[in-house]
Image (tube, grey):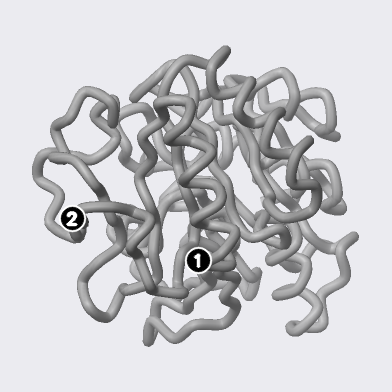
Amino acid sequence: MYKLIAIDLDGTLLDDNKNIPEENLKLLKELIDNGYEVVIATGRRYWSAKQLVKNIDRPMVILANNGNIVRDTKDDQIIIKKYLDLKDFKTLIQEGKERGLYPIIHVDQYEEGIDLIIEMDKAHKKYYNYVAQSEERYKKVENYLEIKEDKILAVVYAGSKEKLESFHFHINERYPNRYSSHIMENIVVADALLEIMNPLGCKWLSLSEYAKEKGIAERQIIAIGDDNNDAQMVKNAGCGIAMKNASERVKKVANIITEKDNNESGVAFELRKILDL
């Protein structure tokens, strides 16, 4: 019945140390070798996601940046791309600046070795350690408003949940249908993250688009996640699974909540039951 399995990374496939537990790793190899289409659906950028799943040692499709860029790991070719309109990007930046918000910009410059654009030093406290000190795949600019590129995947704000929720509400009320956005809660770098993207940018829309191209019906999809950016795919998939450690919003729309969390190979434990493996 099920043909495609979409799995989130952080808080789902990965443990808290950002490794794939042995049982999860073993199961994914087994699934791929048995003909299942396994797709990684993550808010992470493609380069980072590819590094984290390299031990699976199988070609895979990665829906990165919440589905705004989809690539195949065997050749890094782009399958789906959804960029934020440059005018909408600058409107967003200006609105954020007026509220004292300092975002990190995700861009599609994988081949040039650039994934992030920042204005301040990467260690600046306003970035809440979002940009790792070892990070090399970034570019620094004097002013985001001077950016002329048209390959912007996401604008990410880190900070207090209250402040970001207020900005989130303001943007959606003032500019309806111009952005897709969500608040991330299951994170460690800050109280919350606000991710703002192309209006068609979300994991589920890109996953559904990819599945359709492969001749796979939505009812044949299993989707597993833990945070609010997973809610749509968990809700709409044929079988939606929320991790034991998932946010309440994801649990409310799931068909199944795992018995084990991300540190206990909850993904493998649940899939073996569902797929009778």
Image point (64%, 37%), residue name: 182
**What residue is pinned by disc 2?**
140
Question: Mark 2 against mark 1, which lies toward the viewer?
Answer: 2
Quadrant of the rendered image containing residue 263: top left
**Circle 1 crowding by C-alpha within 10 Å: few under 14, some 14–19, many from 20:** many
> Would residue 138 be found to the left or right of residue 157 on screen?
left
Image point (39%, 73%), residue name: 149
Residue 69 in sight in this render: yes
Q: Position of residue 230 (x, y in %)?
A: 66, 41
Query: What is the tally of numbered marks visible in this picture?
Result: 2
Mark closest to the chain's N terminus, 2 or 1? 1
In this picture, is 90 found above or below 109?
above
> Would residue 260 be found to the left or right of residue 150 on screen?
right
The type of residue carrying mark 2 is: Lys
> Would residue 119 be found to the left or right of residue 145 on screen?
left
- Dot 2: what SS? strand
Q: Position of residue 117 (x, y in %)?
A: 28, 56
Q: CA distance from mark 2 to mark 1?
A: 26 Å
- Dot 1: what SS? strand
**What residue is pinned by disc 1?**
62
Q: In the drawing, what numbered circle is on residue 206?
A: none
Q: Position of residue 260 (x, y in %)?
A: 58, 23
Image point (87%, 53%), residue name: 238
Residue 274 in sight in this render: no
Q: Nearer the viewer, residue 101 or 79?
A: 101
Quadrant of the rendered image containing residue 23: top left
Q: Position of residue 108 (x, y in %)?
A: 39, 70
Image point (38%, 20%), residue name: 190
Q: Nearer the viewer, residue 142 or 260?
A: 142
Viewport quadrant of the N terminus: bottom right
